[in-house]
Image (cartoon, rainbow, N blue to C red):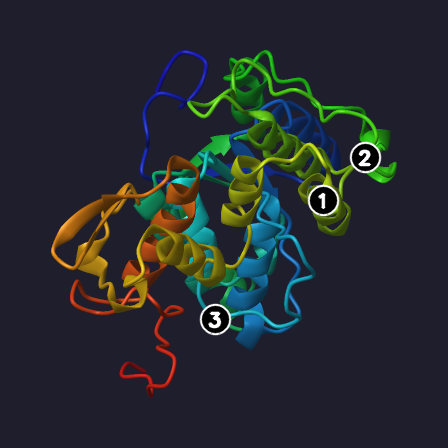
Amino acid sequence: MTANGPWETHLGQPIVIAIRPTNGYEVEYQLREHAAHHGDTAWLHPAITAYRDELGSLAKGMLDAIGAVGLSKPRTYGEAHLLRPLTHLIHGPVRHLIIDDVNLLHAEVLSEVHEACLISHTQLWLIVDVANPVVGHRNTRARELFDWLDDACHIETQQTAMNWWQHRTTSHPHCHPPEPTWWHQPLDHTQPLPAGCPDHRNELGSGHIECLLAWTRRGLTAGHLAPGIARRRLTEYQDHPATTAIDTWALRAAGRDFYTPGTDALRRTHASAETLTLEDVTPDGTTITADGTQHTVTPEMRPAVARLRTSRRLAGCLDHEPMFGMFDQVPGLNPRRR
């Protein structure tokens, strides 16, 4: 842990920020303001409808929080796993995930989130109301939650955590997000797109999509942006006349669908793409081996290929199993794992 906070050393433990009802709202407001200065941070407010769908609801919320809002309206139902957000955490820039109102969640669900953060080397922050009473045997859920927090987490006071975030150095000082009103105004297709900042300019010579995605996360963290509004803006970028093929691939890779952009990229790389297995594709998506020959994937297509391969691996697929599949489903075949 550094002098200003745990930014350089991955603790491996969730950091619990203990707040009390007397000033809990003010603490969360200030923390959101500090966290919104960083494009590598995602803020998640759990929207729980039922215990049996708690993990699915949290997975959708995580995708929105990290900026994977997609280019079209997502399905109304979720999946009872964190494979999609975990894939984005592994390949994306998010290194800090903050969850508020943790008292709403079950310990089993938080354990799943913790595991995902460990795999992706993401620091998990949990905001907990420590004044929540745990009385007798009727409040088993709360008791199990606080037992898990005591066993698995590193608990800090709100003053210490606030000091860390207040003094944290911004990793992209030249990336300045637009005013909140910009998101609600239609994108003028007769005007050029905003240029990418030097901090996000990549090896392909373009960085404005990376800036847009960072602005999305920062707006969602600050609380002045909704996922649907962000999705509309990303769609407007995709339809802009100045958007290049490189930009389009970056937007598709950052969406919720891994299968379509990943398989499209493989088909464009080699005609025998549908026969590829996981061992034929490198984890970073740079090369594939087809018909005994190694082929290089075009740089703008590599993120889509890498995400598809990772999603298959996280689903438990082995090296000899096909790339063309969504998690544990292979088109035309019955699922082999339950």
Q: Tell me if mark 1 has few (under 14), some (14-19) or many (20+) residues whose alpha carbon lies within 10 angstroms of its own.
A: few
Q: Tell me if mark 2 has few (under 14), some (14-19) or many (20+) residues whose alpha carbon lies within 10 angstroms of its own.
A: few
In screen coordinates, is 121 left or right of 278? right
Which residue type does callout 3 highlight? Ala
Residue 210 in percent (x, y) is at 56, 30
Badge 3 is on which residue?
80
Q: Quadrant of residue 1?
A: top left
* Residue visible at 34% across and 74% down in the picture: 328
Location of the C terminus (image quadrant): bottom left
Residue 153 shows in the view: no
**What label sits on residue 239 in the rendered view?**
1
Badge 2 is on which residue?
189
Disc 1 to disc 2: CB gap under 8 Å: yes
Q: Kindly report the distance in space between the C-alpha atoms of the residues bearing marks 3 and 2.
A: 39 Å
Judge whether 90 appears above or below 80 on screen: above
Q: Quadrant of residue 26?
A: top right
* Residue visible at 37% across and 40% down in the picture: 298
**What label sits on residue 209 in the rendered view?**
none
Residue 303 shows in the view: yes
Of circles 3 and 1, which is in front? 1
| Front one among 22 and 73 | 73
Q: Kindly report the distance in space between the C-alpha atoms of the residues bearing marks 1 and 2.
A: 8 Å
Which residue type does callout 1 highlight? Asp
In screen coordinates, is 194 left or right of 201? right
Q: Kindly report the distance in space between the C-alpha atoms of the residues bearing marks 3 and 1.
A: 33 Å
| Front one among 242 and 22 | 242
